[in-house]
Amino acid sequence: MFRETPEGVQISLYVQPNAPRSMIIGEHNGALKIKIKAPPVEGKANEEIVRFFAELLDLPKSKVEMLRGEKSRGKTVLIHGLSLESVRAVVFEG
C-alpha cells in the first residue's frame, strides 16, 4: 500500500469515482481504497485524486504525482517531500 522511495512515498490506490464526496474508505487487496467525487471522464477523477491528497497532506498539488493507472481504478501516486511515517499518520489518523 505504501512504499518509500528516493523520490518520495508511493501509495497504491483502488479508486471508486462518482462518490458524493472524496474520502478514504480503508484497504482493498493491498491498496488504499478511496472514493472520489469526480467522474472518470477526461482526467477529472485523476485531477481530484491529486487535489484530495494535496489538501489532505497540506502540500501543493505539484508535490502529488500520478505515476500509474491513469485510465484504471488501480492507481499509484507519488508524494514528494514527506516521510513514510508522516504520510501514514495523516492517512490513517486524519
Image: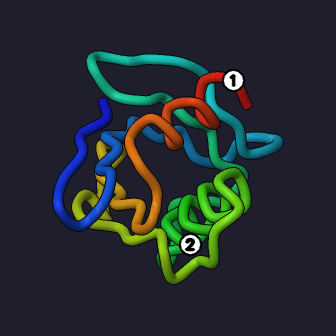
Question: Percent from the top left, x then y, of residue 35?
Answer: 62, 38
Reading the image, the residue beneath label 1 is 93
Q: Residue 47 bears which disc, if any?
A: 2
Q: Residue furthest right?
A: 20
Q: Nearer the viewer, mark 1 or mark 2?
A: 1
Question: Percent from the top left, x then y, of residue 62?
Answer: 51, 83
Q: Amino acid at mark 2?
A: Glu
Who's the residue at 18% across and 54% down the image? 5
Q: Residue furthest left?
A: 6
Name the N-terminal-most of marks 1 and 2: 2
User: Dot 1: what SS?
Assistant: helix
Mark 2: few, some, or many residues within 10 Å (few <14, many ≥20)? some
| Distance CA(mark 1)–CA(mark 2) | 24 Å
- Total number of numbered labels? 2
Image side of residue 39 versus residue 1, left or right: right
> What is the quadrant of residue 55 in the picture?
bottom right
Who's the residue at 70% across and 51% down the image? 56
Q: Amino acid at mark 1?
A: Glu
